[in-house]
Amino acid sequence: MLFAVTMDVALPQDMESDLRADTLAREKAYSQDLQRAGEWVSIWRCVGQYSNLSIFDVRDNERLHEILWNLPLFPFMTIQVTPLAQHPSDIAAG
Ligand SMILES: O=C(O)C[C@H]1C=CC(=O)O1
């Protein structure tokens, strides 16, 4: 199942710098592991915002929830999920 997910990040201004660096490093490793596994298909920076637009390909809603819930940055994110269906004009779909 394909999903488009927008993640808006808002880190606290007074977040301690070591905690901030550790959280961002864990987020990057977590994301890249899922990209290598094929579940996190792509990630794009939204221009001019501390936000990303990502595509996930996961078995079901529960798996996407698990992935998002376990993001190290989850407590500092506002997340919007859009389930995707095939478009009838998509030439790649045949
Ligand atoms: O910077 C972001 O968009 C937040 C986050 C999501 C994955 C990742 O590596 O960083």
Image: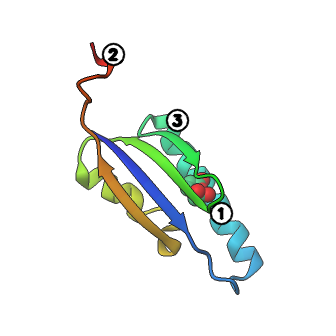
Instruction: Give x and y (percent) for residue 79.
Output: 41, 64
Q: Earlier in the sequence, mark 1 or mark 2?
A: 1
Front-lying residue, 47 or 40:
47
Residue at the outermost front position: 89
Q: Which residue matches tag 2?
A: 91
Which residue is denoted by mark 3 in the rendering?
Answer: 36
Of badges 3 and 2, the one in the foreground is: 2
Mark earlier in primary sequence (3, 2):
3
Ligand 1: image quarter = bottom right
Q: Amino acid at mark 2?
A: Ile
Circle 1 SS class: helix
Give SS at disc 2: helix
Element under disc 3? helix
Q: Which residue is mark 1?
A: 24
Instruction: Mark 1 or mark 3: name the one nearer the start of the chain.
Output: 1
Q: Could you tell me residue 30's position as x and y percent?
A: 54, 52
Quadrant of residue 19 within the rendered picture: bottom right
Quick check: is the Cβ at mark 3 less than 8 Å away from ligand 1?
no
Q: CA distance from mark 3 to mark 2?
A: 27 Å
Residue 31, can we see it?
yes
**Residue 53 locus on image (x, y percent):** 49, 50
The residue positioned 32% from the left and 58% from the top of the image is: 65
Structural crowding at the residue carrying mark 1, measured as other residues with C-alpha within 10 Å and reported as few (<14), some (14–19) or many (≥20):
some
Q: Residue 65 versus residue 80: which sits nearer the camera?
A: 80
Indicate left or right for 53 with 46 as reference. left
In-front residue for pair 69/83: 83
